[in-house]
Image (tube, rainbow, N blue to C red):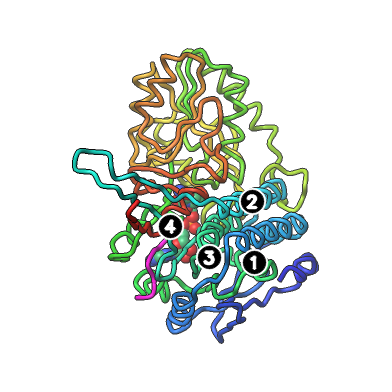
């Protein structure tokens, strides 16, 4: 696949097959994938049948990895090197399938390298524990030890469109680090980056049985990805409705669900407004606003809201958007025209409810402009629900209690950003915001690929991702005790 990316610009069509334990498996039935910017067909992937999925999981479950910690470390370091060496071509592929601009997709390849770097290093760490047993009056001369083992069954992974490479890296790298075997289904909207990553992992020396990529129509194969007997764990990143469907369907499987968000930036009256407005712009428009942790609401103290909004509009005007392949652009398209129309309608609805449109709300196919609104009523659907696009809705608040109340008022609880220097405010926000992360004077999406990340309420069950936490959830902890 890597060698074909260059020809995409000349109109070459990628006719890809699945990677089932390294075998290229096709089908008579295919899914067409179009470039969101040009609307042109860029390639096809097979529609898997249920027996294809069953076969993939059977192979995965039956394979016992012979890899030592050092082997796994080497494979992941090599993967990171291959990704870095081919960063430009890989970013072209993501740009072609997702419509994300080159700045965003180059950044994404860099993040995926970090994931493998951290997972490779973490594979070297034995986190077993030792407990002496003579700690109480009825103690004994023994010790209890813990060790982590890979799951007996396979891991089923399902990923969304917004980071077609990095979301896949965040599933497979911890799986390799813990010697597990995974079958992954990328979204049918952006399936090529996952297939490419499988090729790179095989080239880096991964036994192919440890990672398969299947493609298809979720209406036909999703249930098999959730209920197959050979699966021990389902790890899913995507929206709340499908996440809740999985929670109900994948009965007695371990579940890691990373779902949607409605993250705020909160700007208090003492904030540095230049810094706050820069964070607001980058948090709102990076990746075309399609990040689970994108800034989806701006809750601004009324004393500074006028000036903040002025700066926000000025910095939004400076965002260059258009052709995703133009390296000078800051933003490409959103995932498809349907999504762009959806944002347009939501913005129009907010305006009908009294919000003031200050910039944007222009659409051309899947290209949707950065958009700023002020005086947005806190209960209109633009801000009460997740708007997964480049929209900056400002909600004015009176004081810290009001800011916390508005922030906590939606069903989501992923991350947040707070701009203030007051320690009394900071401690209160950290304690009272009902979210998985609070970033002071940083965007909600700020993290290392290593650090714990994930939401509460409708954003997730509280199990975190990030390389380290994912490795924990992908293992069984065995204890054994010895006379000592
Ligand atoms: P989506 O929920 O529509 O689809 C995600 C995946 O689920 C796709 O692979 C899809 O094919 C699959 N799917 C469809 N029907 C299914 C079913 N019945 N059972 C199992 N899987 C099924 O999400 P999307 O539109 O691709 O991505 C956007 C959403 O993802 C947003 O809500 C965003 O906030 C969320 N997201 C969350 C995180 C996080 O870490 N919390 C990260 C990125 C994106």
Q: Residue at x 42, y 59 (%)?
A: 475
Ligand 1 contact, mark 3 (Cβ < 8 Å): yes
Quadrant of the drawing holding the N terminus: bottom right
Label whose residue precedes the other's in the sequence (2 or 1): 2
- Marks 2 and 1, Cα distance to the nearest angstrom? 13 Å
Callout 4–callout 2 Cβ contact below 8 Å: no
Separation (CA) of disc 3 from disc 4: 28 Å
Q: Which mark is residue 117?
A: 2
Magenta span of residues: 229-234
Task: Please say if 298 is above or below 193.
Answer: above
Q: Nearer the viewer, residue 217 or 376?
A: 217
Does dot 4 land on a helix, a strand or a loop? strand
Disc number for residue 186: 3
- Say the numbered circle drawn on residue 148: 4
Distance, label 3 to label 1, CA atoms, is 16 Å
Q: Earlier in the sequence, mark 4 or mark 1?
A: 4
The reply to whether discs 4 and 1 touch (Cβ–Cβ < 8 Å) is: no
Q: Which mark is residue 11?
A: none
Which residue reaches farthest bottom?
28
């Amino acid at each position: 696949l890597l060698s074909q990316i260059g020809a995409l610009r000349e109109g070459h069509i990628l006719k890809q097959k699945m990677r089932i334990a390294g075998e290229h498996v096709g089908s008579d039935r295919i899914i067409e994938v179009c470039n969101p910017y040009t609307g042109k067909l860029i390639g096809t992937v097979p529609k898997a049948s249920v027996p294809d999925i069953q076969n993939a999981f059977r192979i995965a479950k039956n394979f016992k990895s012979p890899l030592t910690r050092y082997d796994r470390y080497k494979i992941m370091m090599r993967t990171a090197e291959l990704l870095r060496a081919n960063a430009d071509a890989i970013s072209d592929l993501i740009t072609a399938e997702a419509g994300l601009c080159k700045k965003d997709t180059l950044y994404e390849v860099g993040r995926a390298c970090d994931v493998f770097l951290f997972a490779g290093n973490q594979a070297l760490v034995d986190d077993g524990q030792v407990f002496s047993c003579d700690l109480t009056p009825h103690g004994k001369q023994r010790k209890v030890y813990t060790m982590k083992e890979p799951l007996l069954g396979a891991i089923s992974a399902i990923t969304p469109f917004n980071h077609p490479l990095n979301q896949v890296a965040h599933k497979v790298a911890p799986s390799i680090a813990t010697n597990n075997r995974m079958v992954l289904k990328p979204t049918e909207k952006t399936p090529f980056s996952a297939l490419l990553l499988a090729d790179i992992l095989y080239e880096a020396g991964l036994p192919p049985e440890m990672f398969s990529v299947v493609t298809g129509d979720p209406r036909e194969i999703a249930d098999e990805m959730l209920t197959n007997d050979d699966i021990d764990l389902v790890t899913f990143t995507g929206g709340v409705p499908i996440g809740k469907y999985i929670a109900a369907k994948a009965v007695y499987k371990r579940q890691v669900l990373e779902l949607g968000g409605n993250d705020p930036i909160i700007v208090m009256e003492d904030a540095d407004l230049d810094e706050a407005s820069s964070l607001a712009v980058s948090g709102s428009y990076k990746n075309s606003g399609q990040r689970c942790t994108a800034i989806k609401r701006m809750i601004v103290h009324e004393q500074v809201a006028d000036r903040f909004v002025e700066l926000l509009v000025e910095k939004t005007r400076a965002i260059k958007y258009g052709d995703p392949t133009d390296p000078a652009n800051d933003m490409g398209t959103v995932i498809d025209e349907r999504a762009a129309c959806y944002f347009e309608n939501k913005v129009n609805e907010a305006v009908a409810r009294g919000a003031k449109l200050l910039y944007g709300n222009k659409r051309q196919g899947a290209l949707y402009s950065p958009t700023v609104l002020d005086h947005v009523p806190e209960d209109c659907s633009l801000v009460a629900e997740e708007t997964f696009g480049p929209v900056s809705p400002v909600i004015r608040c009176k004081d810290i209690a009001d800011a916390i109340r508005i922030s906590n008022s939606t069903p989501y609880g992923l991350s947040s950003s707070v701009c203030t220097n007051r320690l009394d405010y900071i401690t209160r926000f950290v304690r009272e915001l009902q979210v998985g992360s609070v970033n002071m004077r940083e965007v909600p999406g700020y993290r290392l690929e290593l650090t714990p990340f994930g939401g509460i309420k409708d954003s997730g069950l509280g199990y975190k991702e990030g390389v380290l936490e994912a490795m924990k959830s992908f293992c069984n902890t065995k204890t054994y005790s010895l006379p000592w």
